[in-house]
Amino acid sequence: MDHDRRHFLIRAGSAALFGLGAAAGLPALAATRLLPAASGHGAGNAVRWGMLVDMTRCVEPCSSCIDACHSVHNVPHFDNPKDEIKWIWKMDYANAFPDSGQFASSRQTAAPVLALCNHCANPPCVRVCPVQATFKREDGIVEMDFHRCIGCRFCMAACPYGSRSFNWRDPRPFIEKYDYGYPTREAGVVEKCNFCSERLARGRQPACVEACKNRALVFGNLNDPGSELRRQLSSRVTLQRKPELGTQPSVFYAFERGHD
Amino acid sequence: MHGKLPAFIGIALFAGVVTFPFWIGGERKPMPPPVIEAGLTQCVESAAFMRANHMLLLDQWRDSVVRHNDHIYVNRAGQRFEKSLTGTCLGCHSNKAEFCDRCHDAVAVKPYCWNCHLAPGQPAGPAATAAALPPPSSRFAVTAIPRRGE
């Protein structure tokens, strides 16, 4: 190949032509509609399961909801907090609502807040899962497919609520009593609350809701304006955890008494 | 031309070693049949179908329950069953060791269903440790990272 001026000009010219050709495709690219970052409230679906945690009815030091959930789902108990597995748990108001806790009322901070997976309409854990082991169902439940989980823990990093736990160890020796209606997990798998999808399939309420004698947990369909849940939400002031992140949680909190 | 003999010897040795299991003989062990509880006449599909395809069926059940929230299986005769390994399958075939493990062990298949799913009556708590996986230290080995200057 020779490198005289003539050949250089020919090559430079054809490269420029090629570049112009590529630029002609740009308007087509610009016309591509970008998907919105938030997937909306699932308005098109008939069902979007949600929950109201009525903190005015939640009485310390009761833990029947936690006990019920953890026993029907074979959640192990570890003494070392680093190994902890939790589906529903208690945490301080200041940690659960870090951006609204500066001068929170005593009604808000008096008792620890019940926390669980928010089953976000726009779940960051689903977006980061490389194997689609966690996914959003049509009824709004953010479900885990334990069979597929590879234990990379991206979802744990993505979840802003700390709703996910990792099985560092084989959980079976740390389960007091098996519930044979639900599997255990194995080491290397992430787990979290599934809104009791296995019970919903049989027409039952979630275990925590059934276990709460004070009716502090209201479960229902957020897309049904006639549901008890929607009735409560429309008549009371409620909070979602970290709403500024745009995850659109399906779990709501009430700290003031309703009108009923 | 020269050097052919060692090559042939080598090939013959190789073939001999590779086919060793075949010409050493030994009787072919018959597959142990699964023990089917008395009184059971019919599975969700025919016995021949289940023998050949139970693993595919279970795989389909798993995906349709977990990922598509579809819990009801309708068989060729139009009967409806809950898609459940521990509920429907083990509901009849209650003895996992006699029904599942016998054949799986014979053909050295290790399905990982039982890493999580529980056979009825399986003991819980520390008793479950013995049969479990190796200790966690060997599976998630953490080697100390030497600090600079150490």
Image: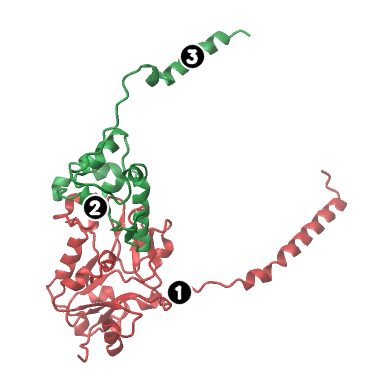
Q: Colour of chain A?
A: red
Q: Position of residue A4 (x, y in %)?
A: 86, 49
Chain identity of mark 2: B
**Disc 2 from disc 3: Cα separation:** 52 Å
Q: Colour of chain B?
A: green
Residue corresponding to mark 3: B12
Residue shown at 83% from the left, 47% from the top? A3
Q: Which one is nearer the viewer's eye here, B41 or A11?
A: B41
Residue corresponding to mark 1: A38
For residue B134, say whether it is visible: no
Query: Looking at the image, is mark 2 or mark 1 nearer the viewer?
Result: 2
In the figure, residue A97 lies in which quadrant? bottom left
Farthest-out residue, right: A6
Q: Is residue B32 above or below residue A242?
A: above
Residue B86, labelled with which disc?
2
Query: Looking at the image, is mark 1 or mark 3 nearer the viewer?
Result: 3
In the figure, residue A132 lies in which quadrant? bottom left
What's the amino acid at mark 3?
Ala
Q: Is residue B27 above or below residue A56?
A: above
